[in-house]
Image (cartoon, rainbow, N blue to C red):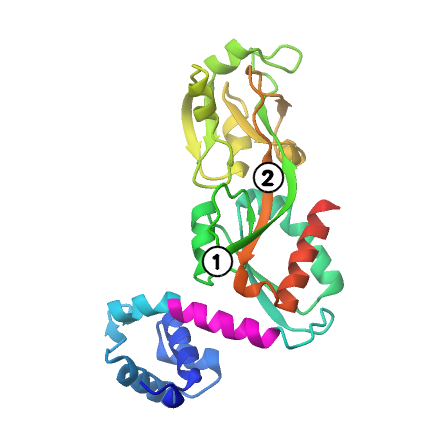
Amino acid sequence: MNLKSVDLNLLVAFDALMSERSVSRAAAKLGITQSALSHALKRLRTMFGDPLMRRGPRGMEPTERAISLQQPMNGILANIHSIISTKLAFDPARTKRTFKLSMSDAMSVEALPLIVRKLRKHAPNIDLLVTSSGPKDACARIINDEVEIAIGVFPHVQSELLRRELYRDELICVADKNNPLLRRGRMDEKSYLGSPHVTVAPNLDSGVQLDEIFVAMGLNRRVVATVPHYIALPALIRGTDLIGHTRLRLVNVLRSSSNLVVFPIPARIRVPELSFEEIWHARYEDDPGHRWLRDLIIDAVRN
């Protein structure tokens, strides 16, 4: 194929069709007529030798070929956007732009309000689209350009992703204040390990796998409930003999909603600190707006 004959606007049309799964919605998103988008789809089908989209019971459904093209297409469009953006000045007070972020439920309570307050003060025309993902999924979504910045604990990060530490935090125990095993607001190791535990699902943002550490020491605990979010802990622990774990920075958020006490993990080990980071793809490294937002996030969560 002669690249001179390729219209890059077709790639934009393909991206809109894949995200909207509807010619009318995709056309509205791009600000063009439905007939113009239908013509673009026809040209795309000719270019790739595949129908790409077929009508189904839930609207337009992509073919296997279209699905296989989505990730590389996203990467191409993101790279083009980054190249163009590096040549443009970024004025946070005037620029209109939407950034796609990923963070856990806990981070949306702890860090997101700080970030939004900074944005409203310095960049009122900047919008955020925030979703939640576990560490592995967040990395994959950044690579696919579904997310531009992810915030959280990331034990394993691919080589094409860049990372910067925001702060460190530590795990502490949480119990109902009337738990009969508490002594002066604390619990000894035997009572702690013998109590029923509730834990946050490890595929989200726990960062440290306590059970792996305990097993290596010959210690065991019984987990009677596994939940996907830290903010579910207060309601589960309140009025029960359950023991949970949260982060020190979240203590005030949890205490505001229940009669809880917090205390250090009473095991014979020092549980490693959690390193919270922001990660992004190398394609955005020199994007002025992206770089500005990364710096704002650090300034917001550290102060």
In the rendered view, does 244 fall on the left or right side of 45?
right
Q: Residue at x 49, y 21 (%)?
A: 242
Q: Are marks 2 and 1 in contact (CB under 8 Å)?
A: no
**Relative depth, front residue between 68 and 131:** 68
Amino acid under label 2? Ser
Q: Tag 2's secondary structure?
A: strand
Instruction: Where is residue 249? Give x, y as percent.
Output: 66, 36
Amino acid under label 1? Ile
**Mark 2 crowd level (few <14, some 14–19, many ≥20, 10 Å Cα):** some
Residue at the disc numbered 2: 275
Reading the chain from its start, which is encountered first: label 2 or label 1?
1
Residue at the disc numbered 1: 142
Residue 68 lies, with reference to residue 37, above or below; the image says above
Boundaries of the magenta span: 72-85
Q: Residue at x 62, y 64 (%)?
A: 290
Q: Residue at x 63, y 44 (%)?
A: 110
